[in-house]
């Protein structure tokens, strides 16, 4: 539901504004943006989340998959 996703984005953006190092806020913003087809915004959030929580493998998997399926094979291999 777009309305719920919009509300979630607002809450997550506030969380990032209060704590730019909030792993889960960046991760879920990446997921929501990815689901909305906003690859550049999703990748930016996944990259921040990956820097904050490198032990969370799913972040890198999502980033690589998204880059590969959008045609950025070099980016996917480098991620």
Image (spheres, grey):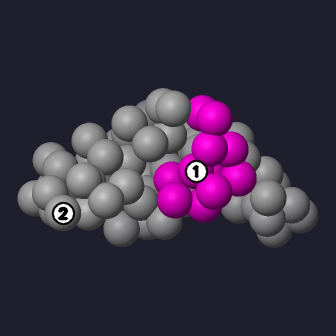
Residue 45 x/y as whole percent: 54, 59
Report the residue marked by disc 2: 74
Residue 53 x/y as whole percent: 68, 44
Quarter of the picture containing the N terminus is top left
Q: The magenta stretch spans which residues?
A: 46-56
Nearest to the observer: residue 22 or residue 75: 75
Counting labels gives 2
Label 1: how many Cα within 10 Å (few below 14, some 14–19, many 20+): many
Helix, strand or loop at label 2? It is: helix
Q: Judge whether residue 69 can be spotted in this image.
A: yes
Locate residue 70 relative to residue 44 in the image: left or right: left
Q: Main secondary structure of the magenta part?
A: helix
Nearest to the observer: residue 75 or residue 69: 75
Q: Is residue 48 magenta?
A: yes
**Which residue is depicted at the point 38% across and 39% down?**
62
Label 2: how many Cα within 10 Å (few below 14, some 14–19, many 20+): few
Q: In the rendered image, which quarter is residue 73 located in?
A: bottom left
Above or below, comparing residue 51 to residue 60 in the picture: below
Report the residue marked by disc 1: 50
Q: CA distance from mark 1 to mark 2?
A: 18 Å
Residue 12 x/y as whole percent: 71, 52
Locate residue 8 relative to residue 36 in the image: left or right: right
**Which residue is depicted at the point 26% across and 41% down?**
65
Q: Judge whether residue 36 can be spotted in this image.
A: no
Q: Is residue 35 magenta?
A: no
Helix, strand or loop at label 1? It is: helix
Residue 27 x/y as whole percent: 59, 45
Q: In the rendered image, which quarter is residue 21 located in?
A: bottom right
**Which residue is depicted at the point 36% across and 68% down?**
40
């Amino acid at each position: 539901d777009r309305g719920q996703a919009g509300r979630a984005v607002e809450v997550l953006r506030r969380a990032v504004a209060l704590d730019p190092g909030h792993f889960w806020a960046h991760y879920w913003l990446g997921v929501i943006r990815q689901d909305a087809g906003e690859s550049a915004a999703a990748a930016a959030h996944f990259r921040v989340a990956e820097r904050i929580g490198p032990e969370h493998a799913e972040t890198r998997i999502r980033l690589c998959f998204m880059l590969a399926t959008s045609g950025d094979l070099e980016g996917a291999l480098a991620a």
